[in-house]
Image (cartoon, rainbow, N blue to C red):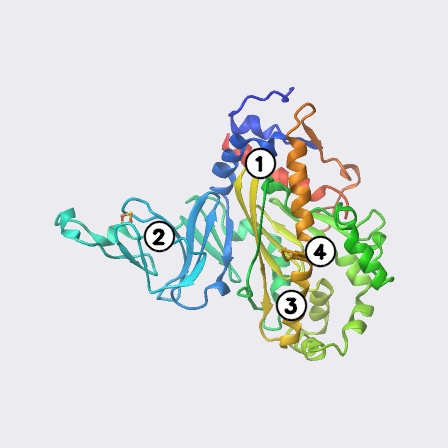
């Protein structure tokens, strides 16, 4: 089937054929018609991460965001419950709030003054008599997202009333989310340390989970690190075919760059280098007390960084919760929330935040270069003379691990194939 002149729009089943075992058609990154199908059949159907409950600790606190293309408010009600409400007045549909975050006693629509409480109940309609005697305020509360569930404070929502449970959706990803949280001796994080935002003119599917690019896109960073610390940061060690690190496809589109092997090999020298640093000894002792020696060391080998992509819009990298917000086929927003740990010395959290700023901040070593390469990728894909994109790297050397995940070396495109396999499946199911 020659799909270089694929007519659009076409059916989800035809679109699913654009993802093959070893290659994908460039139009899945560039076509606005395909983007709209992605929104309908993936983002408006599966579970999406909305945020973390620690962002809204007190009653009335809220954050606005989007589920796919639909605006929602994640709010903690006066009853303490976290809800995800459609940001759409029940009168004529105006967005109730434009601010990203805040704390309110009520949401008042700016158009005609309808007032909702923080649980979404409609409390006041100016001159309500005009609607007649049978008008029932309780029938016009803010519409909740059809399904909302949490995993250890991560708030997820689905715009589909039916489908697998969040527990089923997350599957093996939960164990890696645990690592991200349990690097706190209390097992708790706080996501109110701010947010690093980036917006670029490229498709959302480019973001993250590529172990092939660091030595090239981030060459300057690695050269610098090598100069400062000749041992333990050489090109071959973390992101090359010689590395012991792995790419991992956990299933359901959840994938990770598994950097455990190299960190494990360097753990003794890491501990030695950290000993005596501000806050470290107290932190290490608290971790051992909380989790026991073996589990504490396991978590600290990972450094609380599972480097995982939870399909389709959540990534946990370093200390950050990263949310991917597609805007159009060629426009994406990425929000990176650095987190701090509860129950640790301030110095530990300060070093987490400085490390985040250094690599992911607006004038940092890493993130701006990623955005630049995504935009160049989008420009390149606008050439459709030879529209297929090769994703075959490592295909013939993949193995199935004892936990059932598919593993490749760190530079392999196991991660991209894993994400797009789920993309294809959801498109096929929509057919
Ligand atoms: Fe909200 Fe009229 S649209 S009160």
170 with respect to 235 (left or right): left
Q: Nearer the viewer, residue 337 or 343?
A: 337
Q: Please tell me whether mark 3 or mark 1 is closer to you in this view.
A: 3
Q: Please tell me whether mark 3 or mark 4 is closer to you in this view.
A: 4
Q: Nearer the viewer, residue 216 or 47?
A: 216
- For label 1, the residue is 425
Report x, y in % for residue 393: 77, 38
Q: Please tell me whether mark 4 or mark 2 is closer to you in this view.
A: 4
292 with respect to 167 (left or right): right
Q: Nearer the viewer, residue 195 or 135?
A: 195
Tell me how far mark 3 sits from mark 4, CA to CA: 25 Å
Q: Please tell me whether mark 3 or mark 2 is closer to you in this view.
A: 2
Tell me how far mark 4 sits from mark 1, CA to CA: 36 Å
Report x, y in % for residue 58: 42, 68
- For label 3, the residue is 183
Name the secondary structure under disc 2. loop
Q: Is mark 2 within 8 Å of ligand 1?
A: yes
Q: Residues within 10 Å of mark 3 (few under 14, many from 20)?
A: many
Examine the rendering and report whether any part of residue 404 can be seen.
no
Q: 267 above or below 371?
A: below
Name the secondary structure under disc 4. loop
Examine the rendering and report whether any part of residue 355 can be seen.
yes
- For label 2, the residue is 96
Tell me how far mark 3 sits from mark 2, CA to CA: 37 Å
Q: Quadrant of residue 271?
A: bottom right
- For label 4, the residue is 365
Report x, y in % for residue 333: 55, 47
Q: Nearer the viewer, residue 372 or 126?
A: 372
Indicate which disc, 3 or 1, sits on the residue closer to the N terminus.
3
The residue positioned 64% from the left and 68% from the top of the image is 183
């Amino acid at each position: 089937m020659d799909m270089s002149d694929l007519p659009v729009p076409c059916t989800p089943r035809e679109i699913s054929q654009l993802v093959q075992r070893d290659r994908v058609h460039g139009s899945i990154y560039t076509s606005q018609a395909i983007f709209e199908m992605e929104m309908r059949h993936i983002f408006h159907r599966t579970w999406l991460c909305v945020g973390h409950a620690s962002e809204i600790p007190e009653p009335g606190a809220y954050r606005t965001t989007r589920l796919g293309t639909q605006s929602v408010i994640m709010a903690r009600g006066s009853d303490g419950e976290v809800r995800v409400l459609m940001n759409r007045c029940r009168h004529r549909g105006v967005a109730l709030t434009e601010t990203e975050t805040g704390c309110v006693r009520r949401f008042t629509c700016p158009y005609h003054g309808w007032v909702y409480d923080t649980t979404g109940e409609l409390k006041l309609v100016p001159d309500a008599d005009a609607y007649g005697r049978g008008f029932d305020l309780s029938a016009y509360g803010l519409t909740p997202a059809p399904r909302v569930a949490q995993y250890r404070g991560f708030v997820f929502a689905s715009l589909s009333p039916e489908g697998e449970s969040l527990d089923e959706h997350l599957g093996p990803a939960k164990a890696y989310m645990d690592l991200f949280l349990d690097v706190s001796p209390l097992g708790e994080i706080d996501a109110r340390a701010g947010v690093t935002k980036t917006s670029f003119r490229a498709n959302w599917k480019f973001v993250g989970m590529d172990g092939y690019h660091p030595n090239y896109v981030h060459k300057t960073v690695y050269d610098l690190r090598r100069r400062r610390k000749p041992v333990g940061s050489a090109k071959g060690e973390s992101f090359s075919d010689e590395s012991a690190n792995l790419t991992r496809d956990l299933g359901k589109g959840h994938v990770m760059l598994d950097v455990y092997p190299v960190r494990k090999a360097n753990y003794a020298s890491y501990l030695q280098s950290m000993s005596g640093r501000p806050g470290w000894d107290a932190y290490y002792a608290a971790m051992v007390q909380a989790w026991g020696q073996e589990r504490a060391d396991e978590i600290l080998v990972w450094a609380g960084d599972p480097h995982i992509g939870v399909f389709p819009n959540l990534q946990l990298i370093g200390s950050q919760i990263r949310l991917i917000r597609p805007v159009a086929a060629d426009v994406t927003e990425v929000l990176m929330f650095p987190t701090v740990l509860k129950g640790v010395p301030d110095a530990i959290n300060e070093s987490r935040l400085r490390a985040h700023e250094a690599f992911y901040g607006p004038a940092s070593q890493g993130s701006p270069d990623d955005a630049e390469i995504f935009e160049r990728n989008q420009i390149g894909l606008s050439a459709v003379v030879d529209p297929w994109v090769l994703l075959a790297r490592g295909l013939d050397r993949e193995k199935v691990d004892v936990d059932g995940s598919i593993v490749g070396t760190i530079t392999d495109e196991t991660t991209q194939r894993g994400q797009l396999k789920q993309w294809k499946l959801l498109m096929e199911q929509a057919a």
